[in-house]
Image (cartoon, rainbow, N blue to C red):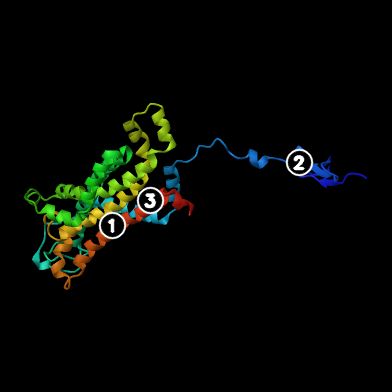
């Protein structure tokens, strides 16, 4: 009986696979062995095996570029930074000059689209120039918190033992003090009361804001310090401090960056809160908190005087919070898999 034929993938026909009889019992078992030419491995051969894998930051950037939340928040933050750096492009009116009482609580006028404050100052000029002070306090307070809290948390998490016990207890003492309440108490000291400015407020916020970053950094370092690449580096002769700086900290930065981004908005709110209470920046310094405080008496007669600085503050803080949420989703591998 002739062997059956089958159509080939390249055209024509091929013979059926050869039969191999295996007799392991009373009944023979037939195995069909396919011809190697009829089992192509083109799909396997076409896979690229020498492509370098993307790093965590590469994968994060690839994910961020596709997130509308990140794009919107980044554009808003860039706009706020641009206003803070170049206020003269948005208004030519000095914020503290040409304040006429005859314009008190006045509405929009030519050259003054947002109206006037209770002192007769241009609202647009004060909001634009106040961007610089509020953003400076938030930015430098965040940098100080990341440096101090990150260093303390990294040392506590990497070395452990008595170092971790001492630094953790110091952090608990400061963590028990609320940020706003602690700043209110400290700012009343004579040394701060007589020298209230942007940098004084930055120092106070850093003094009470570092424990949260320290805790986040400590937890991230503890998770990374026992990784295989750290053990391999130590076995090759890298010192503990070198392993901490070169291998542990770079791989523990992701949660710190997320918290720092959100904290920046928190510090801007803290500055505005202290200024609104009259114990933050002095009245002659342009800031959104001072503008909201100054507009409080005319809340019913001229609500727009408090609306515009409040709107600028809300948009800025919301932008940093949205950016932090986008970074958290992009830098968390578990979130990317969900």
Q: Can you say which quadrant of the picture contains the N terminus?
A: top right
For the residues marked 3 and 1, what is the alpha-carbon distance in whole angstroms? Answer: 15 Å
| Secondary structure beneath label 1 | helix
**Mark 3, mark 1: which one is toward the viewer?**
3
Q: How many labels does the image show?
A: 3
121 is higher (above) or lower (below) than 139: below
Residue 10 drawn at (x, y percent): 77, 43
Classed neighbour count for the residue bearing mark 3: other residues with Cα under 10 Å, few (<14), some (14–19), many (≥20): many
Residue, far front: 26
Location of residue 225 by image quarter? top left
Classed neighbour count for the residue bearing mark 2: other residues with Cα under 10 Å, few (<14), some (14–19), many (≥20): few
Of callouts 3 and 1, which one flags the residue occurring earlier in the amino acid sequence? 1
Residue 48 vs residue 72, the one in the foreground: 48
Q: Residue at x 26, y 45 (%)?
A: 168
**Mark 1, mark 2: which one is toward the viewer?**
2
Residue 157 seen:
yes
Q: Residue at x 76, y 45 (%)?
A: 9
Apparent side of residue 283 relative to residue 304 in the rendered image (left or right): left
Residue 113 drawn at (x, y percent): 22, 64
Q: Residue at x 73, y 41 (%)?
A: 39
Q: Mark 3 points at which residue?
A: 327
Q: Name the residue under label 1.
A: 317
Of callouts 2 and 3, which one flags the residue occurring earlier in the amino acid sequence? 2
For the residues marked 2 and 3, what is the alpha-carbon distance in whole angstroms? Answer: 50 Å
Residue 190 vs residue 299, the one in the foreground: 190
Q: Mark 2 points at which residue?
A: 38
| Secondary structure beneath label 2 | helix
| Secondary structure beneath label 3 | helix
256 is higher (above) or lower (below) than 230: below
Location of residue 325 by image quarter? bottom left
């Amino acid at each position: 009986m002739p062997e059956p034929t089958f159509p080939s993938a390249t055209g024509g026909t091929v013979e059926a696979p050869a039969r191999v009889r295996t007799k392991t019992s009373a009944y023979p078992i037939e195995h069909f062995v396919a011809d190697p030419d009829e089992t192509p491995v083109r799909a396997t051969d076409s896979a690229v095996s020498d492509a370098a894998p993307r790093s965590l930051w590469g994968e994060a950037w690839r994910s961020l570029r596709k997130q509308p939340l990140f794009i919107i928040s980044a554009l808003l933050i860039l706009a706020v930074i641009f206003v803070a750096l170049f206020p003269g492009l948005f208004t030519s009116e000095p914020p503290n000059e040409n304040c006429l009482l005859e314009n008190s609580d006045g509405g929009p006028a030519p050259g003054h689209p947002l109206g006037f404050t209770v002192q007769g100052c241009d609202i647009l000029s004060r909001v634009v120039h106040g961007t610089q002070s509020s953003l400076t306090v938030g930015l430098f307070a965040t940098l100080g918190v990341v440096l101090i809290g990150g260093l303390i948390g990294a040392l506590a998490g990497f070395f452990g033992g008595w170092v971790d016990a001492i630094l953790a207890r110091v952090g608990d003492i400061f963590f028990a003090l609320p940020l706003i309440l602690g700043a209110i108490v400290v700012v009343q000291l004579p040394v701060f009361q007589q020298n209230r400015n942007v940098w004084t407020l930055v120092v106070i916020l850093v003094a009470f804001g570092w424990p949260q970053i320290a805790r986040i950094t400590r937890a991230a370092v503890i998770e990374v310090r026992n990784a295989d690449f750290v053990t391999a580096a130590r076995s090759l002769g890298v010192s503990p401090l070198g392993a901490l700086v070169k291998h542990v900290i770079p791989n523990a930065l992701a949660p710190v960056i997320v918290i720092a981004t959100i904290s920046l908005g928190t510090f801007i709110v803290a500055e505005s809160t202290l200024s609104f209470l009259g114990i933050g920046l002095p009245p002659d310094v342009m800031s959104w908190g001072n503008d909201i405080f100054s507009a409080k008496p005319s809340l019913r007669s001229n609500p727009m005087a408090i609306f515009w600085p409040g709107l600028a503050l809300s948009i800025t803080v919301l932008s940093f919070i949205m950016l932090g949420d986008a970074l958290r989703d992009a830098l968390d591998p578990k979130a990317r898999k969900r």
